[in-house]
Image (cartoon, rainbow, N blue to C red):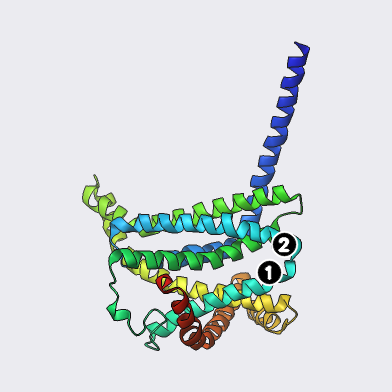
Amino acid sequence: MSGLLALLDDVAGIAKVAAASVDDVIGQAAKAGSKAAGAVIDDAAVTPKYVAGFSADRELPIIWRITKGSLKNKLVFLLPIGLLLANFAPWAIPPLLMLGGAYLCFEGAEKVAHALGWGHGHEDYAGKETEIEDPAHLEEQKAQGAIKTDFILSAEIMTIALSAIPKSNFWMEAATLAAVAIMITVAVYGSVALIVKADDVGLALATRGQIGPVRAFGRGLVKVMPGFMKLLTIVGTAAMLWVGGEIIVHGTAQMGWHGPENWIYGVGKNIGSEFVSGSGFVAWLIKATLHGLMGLAIGFVLIPVGERVITPIWRSVAPKAV
């Protein structure tokens, strides 16, 4: 009997340690995730544009597909790569992130150029008119594009989160980073799902609401959402340029060239200090704008390289991927 009691006491002790470890993981994950809030907002702003133009019944399946791709990006690729690089080759992280930032700058600048009527875009090329753009192919193309963009934003999120995790053993860091990945993915794509289905909710309220105010709210939601989605598309493109520019500027500082980062932060601080209230927000807005303009300039430089060199090579190597 005493042996059984001793065993139960050991089990209770192990359970307490496990519970404490889970609490530590969740607590650290919440703190690390909050550090990456800016990139998380960018991710949520970028994604809805990938379901624009599809029928309502295809929106949630596309978002679910992107969600699964995002989890795969974070848990299967970025988590082990991040931990290995952080522990064995931290010097490789800045240049890799800068490559991702350059991709975001390219994509964002190309969308700006297309909106202004410049160029034809890397998805418009000789022979494309012979391809059948059926809905399934278009959906596949959009989902893959979203997952590629998510990979870059997720890399930024995971890197920021990893830097915010207190030094501990390998498995605690891995568990915390996995918790960050799951929490952020659920938050981002849950929010995206709510945003893209808001017009359907509004229509349901407008037609089935039991009282006048509810029906009026539904009609207002239906009217507002198309404009809001267009605005979110613009915000998403701006976010790509902002994050891409910031990654590159910060990466050059980490590699020893502090000039651009010091100048941007100096301008933001000086202008922000002129405002009695809201100086912090003004400083942030100035820095975000300058990072975005830097990203746009880098993207415009990269457009001819991407369209005339990288994309044709990639199309010849993997024709089904484009």
Q: Residue at the location (47% across, 76% down)?
A: 317
**Residue 130, quarter of picture:** bottom left
Q: Vertical placement of 110 versus 187: above or below?
A: below
Residue 141 to residue 17: above or below: below
Q: Nearer the viewer, residue 40 or 6?
A: 6
The circle drawn on residue 86 is 2
User: In the rendered image, is residue 155 in sight?
Assistant: yes
Name which residue type carries label 1.
Answer: Ile
Q: For the C terminus, which image quadrant?
A: bottom left
| Residue 89 figure quarter | bottom right
- Residue situated furthest top in the rendering: 1
Mark 1, secondary structure of its residue: helix
Q: Position of residue 114 (x, y in %)?
A: 39, 83
Residue occupying the point 70% across, 63% down: 85
The residue depicted at 70 percent of the width and 55 percent of the height is 165
Residue 185 locus on image (x, y percent): 52, 55
For this view, does 177 lie left or right of residue 234? right
User: Quick check: 149 left or right of 165?
Assistant: left
Q: Quadrant of residue 158?
A: bottom right
Label drawn at residue 53: none
- Point 76% across, 54% down: residue: 167
Amino acid, disc 2? Ala
Contact, CB < 8 Å: mark 2 with mark 1?
yes
**Residue to which mark 1 is pinned:** 93
Tell which residue pokes out farthest to the front in this image: 317
